[in-house]
Image (cartoon, coloured by chain):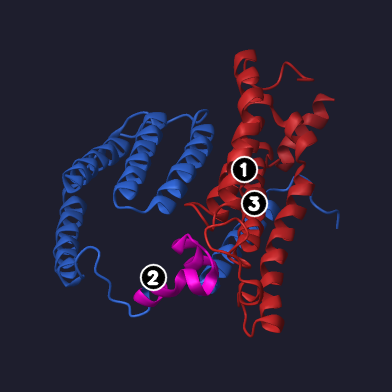
Amino acid sequence: MVHVIIYILIIFMLLAALVALEAKNLLSSVVSIGAVGFMLSVVFLLLRAPDIAIIQVIIEILTLVILIRATIAVDVHLVKNIRQFFPFAICMVLLLLLFMFASKAMDLLPEFGNYLSEVAPHYLANGLKETGSANIVTSVILDYRAYDTLGEATVLFTAILGAVVLLRRKAKND
Amino acid sequence: MTNNKSGLSEIVKSVCCWIEGFIFLFGCYIVLFGHLTPGGGFAGGVIMAASFILIMLSFGKERVDLLFPWTRSTLVESFGALLFIGVAWLGIYYGGGFFANFLHQKFGGTPFTFLSGGTIPISNVAIALKVMAGLFLVFYVLSTHKVILDEDISKTEKDK
């Protein structure tokens, strides 16, 4: 039953993504991108990953607000839709090749719910005892794999530093 | 409420007055109970940033400048980053490794209660401070700061 719901949601996500690509109005394509994100969060929730679902919902709201604010005043320049044959054909062939390779690679993946890494059962068995955190995701993020979180925090810090430095109002008089 | 002209309409402003505190409180809950329930520093920090962004969208820039000026938010972001690294450094001296959970090794604490998890809640709070101030800063900078070219400056000087 859950699988059927997930497949239906994925089909609607693909449709919304197509609408976002083909929409004439910039605002409507932003809204349909938001629909893709919210459906993705429902899929995460059905796959029993509530942490990721929460983050997906909130980030989607924030990016929607930023994108709508950015696009609401922008004029759209209409471009004549000339689809040349050869670039389109090459693009389609490449997409087909990519799809074939991806389907080959998907066959090699383990089945859903089965793990390959050998540390995963250790985390599941000893996570509560060794870190004292009842939420296993937090114990992995902030204890076993804290280096990853440090790197992610550094990336965010650097990005915000760049934005603030480039867009500050007053330059130094030099 | 000092400047009625800026921001959105009166209905939006009064609704935001009611719910902005609850949104911030929900973010605090997600952060502080991140080691017990789904959520954590990143999700809670984004919720808290969203409450400030709601104030900024509905009331305009002036009210947010009073509540959380951007000089203070840079300080909060740097403090969060330093707190996260400081907890990790303390692990070297007291726990035997970078990011060692020394508080849990020493004091333990009963699982499934608020005082458990050792350094994990502290790291959650640090990440939440960092993410809240950082995302708010990005929104503030992108939506208020304008690039002024030299031609524009000469135009405004001519107008004067």
For the residues labelled 1 and 2, say whether their Cβ atoms are less than 8 Å apart.
no
Mark 1 highlights which residue? B48
Query: What residue is disc 3 on?
Result: B134
Count the labels in the image: 3
Q: Which residues are magenta?
A: A121-142
Which quadrant, please, contains the C terminus of chain B? top right
Q: Which amino acid type is marked by label 3?
A: Gly
Residue A15 occupies which quadrant of the picture?
Answer: top left
Does A120 sit left or right of A174 as displayed?
Answer: left
Q: Quadrant of residue A158?
A: bottom right
Q: Tell me which chain appears red.
A: B
Q: Amino acid at mark 2?
A: Leu
Give whichever of discs 3 and 1 has the lower sequence position.
1
Local secondary structure at mark 2: helix
Mark 2 = which residue? A124
In this view, the mark in front (3 or 1): 1
